[in-house]
């Protein structure tokens, strides 16, 4: 009788151990899922930061290039104005001389 009682106790203990192992496995799986979700969220945040940084850098570069092009355009405009003013003066002088002539 005592042996049967010990066997039943051992079976109950084994069953309890199995149940605890199942519970622990579920807990471990849930923790792993949470860690994956946290890692994914962190990666997404890092990706967004990188995109924002790239956009800001591109914006700065674009503004610098626009300012440089504006300066070049103004320089070219002034150069063309100077070249055309001397030609205009010569043309006006030629027309005046022709009309006097």
Image: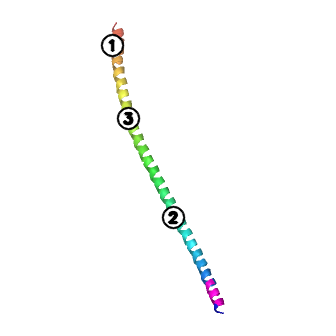
Which residue position is annotated with label 2? 35
Near mark 3 (Cα within 10 A), the count class, few <14, some 14-19 or many ≥20, is few
Determine the residue positioned at 57% across, 77% down.
20
Q: CA distance from mark 3 to mark 1?
A: 38 Å
Is residue 41 found left or right of 84 in the rendered image?
A: right
Which residue position is annotated with label 3? 68
Question: Magenta region: which residues?
Answer: 3-10
- In the image, residue 101 above or below residue 51: above
- In the image, residue 18 above or below residue 72: below
Q: Reading the chain from its start, which is encountered first: label 3 or label 2?
A: 2
- In the image, residue 8 above or below residue 30: below
Percent x, y of residue 8: 64, 87
Percent x, y of residue 88: 35, 18
Front residue of this view, candidates 86 and 12: 12
Q: Reading the chain from its start, which is encountered first: label 1 or label 2?
A: 2
Looking at the rendered structure, the secondary structure element under dot 1 is helix
Percent x, y of residue 76: 37, 27
Looking at the rendered structure, the secondary structure element under dot 3 is helix
Quadrant location, the N terminus:
bottom right
Say which of marks 3 and 1 sits in front. Answer: 3
Which residue position is annotated with label 1? 93
Near mark 2 (Cα within 10 A), the count class, few <14, some 14-19 or many ≥20, is few
């Amino acid at each position: 009788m005592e042996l049967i009682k010990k066997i039943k106790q051992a079976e109950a203990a084994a069953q309890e151990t199995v149940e605890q192992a199942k519970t622990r496995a579920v807990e471990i799986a849930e923790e792993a899922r949470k860690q994956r979700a946290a890692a994914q969220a962190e990666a997404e945040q890092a990706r967004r930061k990188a995109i924002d940084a790239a956009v800001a850098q591109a914006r700065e570069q674009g503004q610098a290039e626009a300012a440089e092009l504006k300066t070049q355009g103004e320089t070219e405009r002034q150069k063309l104005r100077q070249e055309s003013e001397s030609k205009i003066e010569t043309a006006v002088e030629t027309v005046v001389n022709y009309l006097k002539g």
